[in-house]
Amino acid sequence: MKIIVLLLIIINFLNAQIVVVTNKNSHFKEIPKDIIQYIYLAKTNNIDDIKVVPILSSDEKLHNEFCDKVLCKSPSQYNSYWIRLVFTGRKPIAKRYDFNDVVKKLNELNTIAYINKEDIKEEWKIIYEDN
Amino acid sequence: MKRKHIILNFITISLLSISGYSADLDIKAFGTISGVYNNNGNYIYRKDIFQKDGSSNDLSFETDTLIGLQTIVNINENYSFALQGIVNNNCDDKIEAKIDWGYLKYDSNENIIIKLGKIRTPYYRNSENLNIGYSNLMIRESVEVYGQVPFSSYNGVEFIYSDIISRYFYTIQAGYGAEELSVPIHSLNQKANVDVNNLYAVNLTFGTDALQLRTTYLNADITASNISIDQLFTGLRAFGFNDLANRYEFKNTNSEYLGFGLFIDYKNFIFSSEYAQRRIPSFFADTHGYYITFGYNFNRIIPFITYSKSKMDTATYEANTVSNELNALLHAQNLAQTSKLIGIKYYVNENVDLKFQYENIKPIGEFGSYYLSSLQYPQTLNVFSFAMDFIF
């Protein structure tokens, strides 16, 4: 029994919790999951008339988990969806940023990004937490 | 200069001149390399009514293979030029390079997009990305639905408004324009010059990320003519068959198209279905068709099955008028058939996918199906296709 509990703890540790964050001074408080989905699927880019800028991570594992847990899509599905937007002239290819660039980007108000919860910084606030 | 070329040339020249000094130029390539084998030598299997050649008891690489290039020049945050061109096998069975669409776009970066130029007509869910195989599940969309309207773009203006109400998103697309094109009637070795005027299209998409509903309505005044067709109807009137001529002549005919779609993408389950009908009171008869697709997403691998059916609302293949020429023209319009399809898509990486599919097709009625044949009584086709799609 102890071994099973230990394994569960390890699995939980390996699958770090994903949160969506923004600058503490941004206008948003909490954003529900389906609105996060709409933002990352480019179906909307504003909340309460405020323009939101979503940032994608170049960390493959984090990105895949975000696709799976938050967007409820496989990474290949998400990629295919985005390609459709690109090749119908609607959106450019979405840039992916490493953590250092994400930190810089989040200095701008109303920019949002998904990170591992353990990486959160004092100047950020959580607007969505995957439970 | 023809009307349809004016806007396009304006956009092409503007795009080329701007791209000379603009740093914000985005060029992308896409394509499909595909092979098709149809086991019935009495039919030429083809992608749509435009294609002349395809598979007839042999392996054909002409059906779906294409390469394309997309260029977008961002002038500023709100304005951009976009142009997409493809190279594929054309209706004369020759390799042809052509501009598929190109427009000046205004994007408010909030809710509104306005396009001016040559614009893809938003009949179906995948109308705007038909040539981008990587973004689609099947190698080719169901011809029973997607083959009903013989033009895919128009010259004009489009207005798009998107927003969210509570937890639901919606998009309204409204377009107005005109188009001129040449539509082959391969079974009669003819081409019809088609003029589409006063075209307006409205599309509403509504739903959530997991469930979407879509409806489209299109109305246009359409004329299809050539020397043979004109002589046929002039002759009918000369001999006093005015009613017959009025019934079947395709001249400034008010034409309607109506489509519905339901799409579910929930967890790993994929469901999509579209129903479409066209109302064109002329020799180009009324039809309706639908398809139903189920798929399951195993991350990189998606197996899927599809059932499709198209039906003539007027059984033109049974036409027995006083004119043999008119009868032949009406027989050539029978597009009725059913298809059962099973296939698989494999995402190799972010740039390449592989697909394989098998179709069992049963034409309905005399001279039936989308595929070329001189057979009066229909036979079954078994079609095997494979494809590699890429984007860069």
Image (cartoon, rainbow, N blue to C red):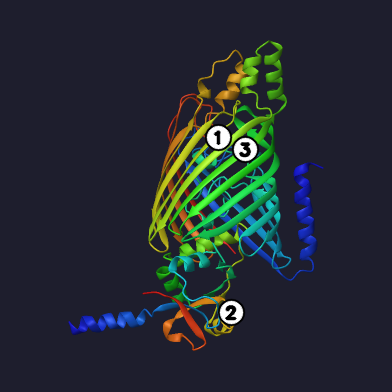
* Residue B150, quarter of the rendered image: top right
Q: Disc 1 marks which amino acid?
A: Arg
Q: Where is residue A36 in the image (x, y as percent from the top left)?
A: 48, 69
Q: Position of residue B80 (x, y in %)?
A: 71, 62
Residue found at x 54% / y 49%: B204
Q: Which element type, helix, strand or loop, lies under badge 1?
A: strand
Q: Which element type, helix, strand or loop, lies under badge 3?
A: strand
* Marked residue chain, label 3: B
Instruction: Give the residue number, with chain letter if any, for mark 3.
Output: B219
Q: Residues within 10 Å of mark 3 (few under 14, many from 20)?
A: many
Q: Which element type, helix, strand or loop, lies under badge 2?
A: loop
The numbered mark, 1 or 3, whose residue comes first in the sequence reads: 3
**Vertical side of B183 occupied by B21: above or below:** below
Of tags 3 and 2, which is closer to the observer? 2
Asked if residue B172 lies left or right of residue B81, the reply is left
* Marked residue chain, label 1: B
Residue found at x 62% / y 22%: B248
Q: Where is residue A5 in the image (x, y as percent from the top left)?
A: 23, 82
Q: Disc 3 marks which amino acid?
A: Asn
Asked if residue B59 lies left or right of residue B22, the reply is left
Residue B336 visible in image: yes
Instruction: Give the residue number, with chain letter if any, for mark 2.
Output: A109
* Residue B1, quarter of the rendered image: top right
The foreground one among A39 and B358 is A39
The foreground one among A77 and A35 is A35
Give the residue furthest to the right.
B1
Of tags 1 and 3, which is closer to the observer? 3
Q: Give the mark count.
A: 3
Instruction: Give the residue number, with chain letter if any, for mark 1.
Output: B278
